[in-house]
């Protein structure tokens, strides 16, 4: 019952940190260039998309890896 809880928390933290890191980079660039909130929003969206892609890759590798055992 609790076997996939760890991977669920891992996926959640990947989504949150990816969005936060890229959003923070966008925020910093917005402050630097004075373009608030354009780069912040772009950074958050790119971070979310990159996180989803990373989770997809991790899940695909975990699925392929479990079939080889």
Image (cartoon, helix red, strand yellow):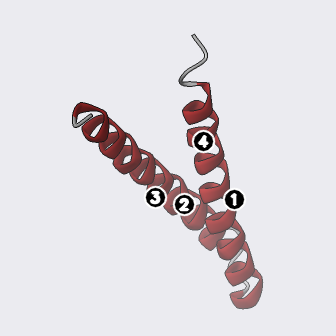
User: Where residue 60 sits: x, y (%)?
Assistant: 30, 42
| Residue 26 sits in quarter | bottom right
The disc, 1 or 2, on the residue closer to the chain's N-terminal end is: 1
Kindly indicate whether the residue at mark 1 contacts the one at mark 3 (C-beta within 8 angstroms). no
In three-dimensional space, the C-alpha distance between marks 1 and 2, rounded to whole angstroms, equals: 7 Å
Q: Quadrant of the C terminus?
A: top left
Q: Counting other residues with Cα less than 10 Å from the Cα at mark 2, is it few (<14), some (14-19), or many (20 or more)?
A: many
The disc, 4 or 1, on the residue closer to the chain's N-terminal end is: 4
Kindly indicate whether the residue at mark 2 contacts the one at mark 1 (C-beta within 8 angstroms). yes
* Residue matched to label 1: 20
User: Where residue 52 sits: x, y (%)?
Assistant: 45, 47
The disc, 4 or 2, on the residue closer to the chain's N-terminal end is: 4
| Residue 32 sits in quarter | bottom right
In three-dimensional space, the C-alpha distance between marks 3 and 1, rounded to whole angstroms, equals: 12 Å
- Pick the front one: 17 or 28: 17
In three-dimensional space, the C-alpha distance between marks 4 and 2, rounded to whole angstroms, equals: 16 Å
* Residue matched to label 4: 10
User: Where residue 48 sits: x, y (%)?
Assistant: 53, 53
User: Where residue 56 sits: x, y (%)?
Assistant: 37, 44
Left or right of 26? Residue 42 is left
Kindly indicate whether the residue at mark 2 contacts the one at mark 3 (C-beta within 8 angstroms). yes
Secondary structure beneath dot 4 equals helix
* Residue matched to label 2: 47
Label drawn at residue 50: 3
User: Relative to 2, is 8 above or below?
Assistant: below
The disc, 3 or 1, on the residue closer to the chain's N-terminal end is: 1
In three-dimensional space, the C-alpha distance between marks 4 and 3, rounded to whole angstroms, equals: 15 Å
């Amino acid at each position: 019952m609790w076997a996939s809880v760890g991977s669920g928390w891992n996926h959640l933290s990947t989504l949150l940190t990816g969005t936060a890191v890229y959003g923070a980079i966008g925020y910093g660039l917005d402050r630097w260039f004075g373009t608030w909130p354009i780069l912040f929003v772009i950074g958050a969206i790119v971070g979310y998309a990159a996180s989803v892609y990373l989770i997809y890759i991790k899940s695909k590798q975990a699925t392929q890896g479990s079939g080889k055992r």
